[in-house]
Image (cartoon, rainbow, N blue to C red):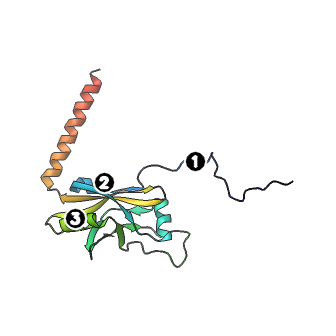
Amino acid sequence: MATKTSRKASKSKDAPAKKAGPIAVNRRATYDYEIIETVEAGLVLTGTEIKSIRNGKVDLRGAYARELKRELWLEGMHLAIYEQGNTNNHEPKRSRKLLLHRKQADDWGAQLTQKGLTVLPLRLYIKGRVAKVLLGLAKGKRRYDKKDNLIAREADRDIRRELKGGR
């Protein structure tokens, strides 16, 4: 009696582990803005967009979120065109809908109407099989605030260096 063989391809245990951590980080946002609050949101993407994200071809500089009809949309995020795509490839800078709970979207949309507040993508990463973006409600820093942060960071670095050398 012949045994049945499984037609499913088994995953190799020797397969290399995928890179954990963020795919894209908006470092400029934490320098130029004071982050008040953060929230994790999903993205509505097409097939070639998620493939570009998995390849790490994302640029968050200059990206921001805006409210339109009680929904938040991510503007200005550049997703490179997928190299193996065909003529139906995605537009690199199109608006992408953010997936949030209704209450979160309403709260953040109301805060966007306040003067000086904006919503910025801080980090883009893969969680399970889906792409997630960490959004930050931010207020712009003044030039002297940036300088104060830089001076404080250098002072902390000097203190750590002295403590490490004193052991």
Relative horizontal placement of residue 138, taking residue 15 as reference (left or right): left
Mark sitting earlier along the chain (3/2): 2
Closer-to-camera residue (135/51): 135
Q: Are marks 1 and 2 in contact (CB under 8 Å)?
A: no
Q: Considering only vertical position in the picture, is 74 above or below 40? A: below
**Residue found 68% across the figure and 58% down from its top:** 8
Measured as percent of width and height from the top left, residue 117 is found at 18, 63
Split into 4 quadrants, where in the image is the N terminus?
bottom right
Q: Residue furthest front?
A: 1
The label nearer to you, 3 versus 2, is 3
Which mark, residue 16? 1
Residue named by callout 2: 27
Q: Amino acid at mark 2?
A: Arg
Residue drawn at x 24%, y 27% as measured from the top left: 162
Q: Which mark is residue 107?
A: 3
Q: What kind of element bears circle 2?
A: helix
